[in-house]
Image: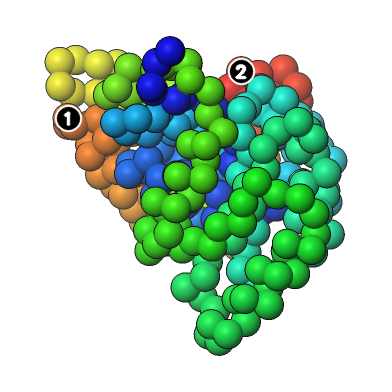
Amino acid sequence: MSAIRSGQIAIVGRPNVGKSTLLNALVGEKVSIVSQRAQTTRHRIMGILTGPDAQYVFVDTPGFQTRFGNALNRTMNRGVRQALSEVDVVLLVVEAGRLDDRDRAVRRLVPRDRPLIIVVNKIDRLSDKARLLPYLARLAGEGEFAAIVPVSALRDEQLAPLLAETRKHLPNTGLLYAEDEITDRSERFLAAEYIREKLFRLIGDELPYTTTVDIEKFVVDGALRRISAAILVDRPGHKAIIIGSGGEVVKRIASEARQDMERMFAGQVFLEVFVKVKSGWADDERMLKTLGYE
């Protein structure tokens, strides 16, 4: 039997607990976008870490949404449920010092036959470290878990113990992916995500939730990529917010996204970004499939 353990590990939790930051820290590359705004992640994204004795296939999921019921959120919640039904291990990410009904709602989605590890993230934000032990005791009283591991994904702290606990529950199947693969997503998909991240970061709370990115052209010419991307908004008034005075905002979005792409793709990128009004896209099942929402 192979000594290499491999398996899929779902990273789940309520919005804004740091799931994508944790995925990127574990993989060591930016495969999932991150912002301060909740519900940044909208797709299931795999991040792959291959070590000498294990291959971890992490599945980042959108934060499970209980407040909104449009087609986009129903699709994202469906993706969370599907991921949980397919994986070998589940990492439930909670925020250090906090535990509420939203965390418990996600926990109830986890199949009882899946090993469940509680990842207590953001321990670096606890001003009073003495609060951590009582909080961990409170967590332990919530039920039976395979392990409870405090971490700081932002500072790469305690990730080795988390990997060690996770490996215990992976089957001895050999490698599932090539050793040099870090994600299952295409460059085209990553390009759209990098642009969307800059939208969240540069516009913040002013950005309407019903904003997305559609890659209309992606051409590889040797080491050069020529990309044309449309930012889709729901209303004409939203368009002005994204373009900004004299086009300043959209130019900065394009510039910063291009820099991320060139780092990830290891080549020059020619990026064209423009804004389109596409009313009702977030509640249109057909449009969601066209945009890659599953």
Residue bearing the label numbered 1: 267
Which residue is most to the front? Answer: 1
Dot 1, how many residues are within 10 Å of its Cα: few (below 14), some (14-19), or many (20+)?
few
Residue 174 lies, in percent from the top left, at: 41, 16
What is the quadrant of residue 135 in the picture? bottom right
Q: Which residue is painted at 43% across and 13% down in the image?
A: 1
Considering depth in this image, is 244 or 160 the residue closer to the camera?
160
Label 1 element class: loop
Q: Which residue is painted at 39% across and 23% down in the image?
A: 4
Relative side of 36 to 208, left or right? left
Q: Amino acid at mark 1?
A: Gly
What is the quadrant of residue 267 in the picture? top left
Between disc 2 and disc 1, the foreground one is 1
Nearest to N terminus: mark 2 or mark 1: 1
Considering depth in this image, is 161 or 284 the residue closer to the camera?
161
Residue 23 lies, in percent from the top left, at: 46, 44
Relative side of 262 to 190, left or right? left
Q: Mark 2 to mark 1: distance in Å?
A: 28 Å
Q: Quadrant of the C terminus?
A: top right
Q: Amino acid at mark 2?
A: Thr
Determine which of the numbered discs, if any, sits on residue 195 in the image.
none
42 in relation to 86, above or below: below
Considering depth in this image, is 41 or 85 the residue closer to the camera?
85
Residue bearing the label numbered 2: 290
Q: Which residue is painted at 67% across and 43% down in the image?
A: 116
Label 2 element class: helix
Q: Are marks 2 and 1 in contact (CB under 8 Å)?
A: no
Relative side of 119 to 34, left or right? right
Does the image show residue 55?
A: yes
Q: Which residue is painted at 37% across and 34% down in the image?
A: 49
Considering depth in this image, is 94 or 212 the residue closer to the camera?
94
